[in-house]
Image (cartoon, helix red, strand yellow):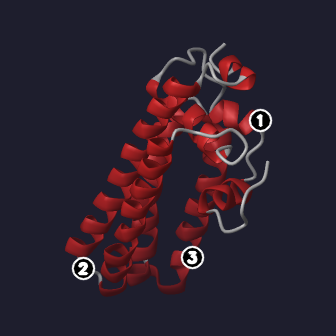
Amino acid sequence: MTRSRWDIFALSERMMQMDEDSWARHANPLSVLSRMTILPLFTLAILSRAWWGWGALVPVGLVVVWVWWNPRAFGKPRNKRSWAAHGTFGERLFLNRNTVRIPPHHRVWALALASISGIGLAPWIYGLWNVDFGFILTGLTLMIGGKLWFVDRMVWLYQDMKTTHPTYATWEE
């Protein structure tokens, strides 16, 4: 697979050390849905600096471990036809977009939704720095909302492409 080292999606996959087994486990709806806890937990961990000072590094570290462990924490799903499983399969398709072309509208939407999530970083960081819950919630809404919409688009991508490549067709079995 030829991927740019500047591809934020591929960088994330490398940092998470995703392999076939972890991808298969991540297709479990419990993995996908519990992943949505990461940003709220990270927010609380960072805000805990107000109470614990440098001790806040402990909950921050625990959240970082949860980020890595989450795709491995649950068993492989029995039903691979769920929204969550298809979202995970679509993410894999999207990551493979430089090897197996995807329809341009899926690429555009995925990048736009990732940008919306990215825009949410600014108010979130500002809110965390200044302990301003309005900015924190605005940032969380953009980041989590963008991610959920992204996953939904990945479901659509998988449904559009699952019969276009022999490997993709086997993921649902």
Q: CA distance from mark 2 to mark 3?
A: 20 Å
| Number of other residues with Cα within 10 Å of mark 1, as a class: few under 14, some 14 to 19, many 20 or more | few
The tag earlier along the polypeptide, 2 or 3, is 3
* Residue at the image position 57 percent from the left and 27 percent from the top: 161
Q: Is residue 10 above or below residue 133?
A: above
* Residue at the image position 66 percent from the left and 68 percent from the top: 6
Q: Position of residue 95 (x, y in %)?
A: 64, 46
Instruction: Please name the residue that numbered disc 1 is placed on.
Output: 20
Q: Is residue 120 above or below residue 9?
A: below
**Could you tell whether 160 is left or right of 141 in the image?**
right
**Could you tell whether 32 is left or right of 118 in the image?**
right
| Number of other residues with Cα within 10 Å of mark 3, as a class: few under 14, some 14 to 19, many 20 or more | some
Residue 105 or 94: which is nearer the viewer?
105
Q: Amino acid at mark 1?
A: Glu
Residue 8 or 97: which is nearer the viewer?
97
Residue 6 or 72: which is nearer the viewer?
6
Q: CA distance from mark 1 to mark 2?
A: 41 Å
Q: Position of residue 29 (x, y in %)?
A: 50, 30
Residue 25 or 149: which is nearer the viewer?
149
Which quarter of the picture shows residue 24?
A: top right
Q: Amino acid at mark 2?
A: Asp
The tag earlier along the polypeptide, 3 or 1, is 1
Which quarter of the picture shows residue 143?
A: bottom left
Instruction: Please name the residue that numbered disc 3 is placed on.
Output: 57
- Which label is found at residue 132? 2
- Mark in the foreground, 2 or 3: 2
Which quarter of the picture shows residue 88?
A: top right
* Residue at the image position 35 percent from the left and 73 percent from the top: 124
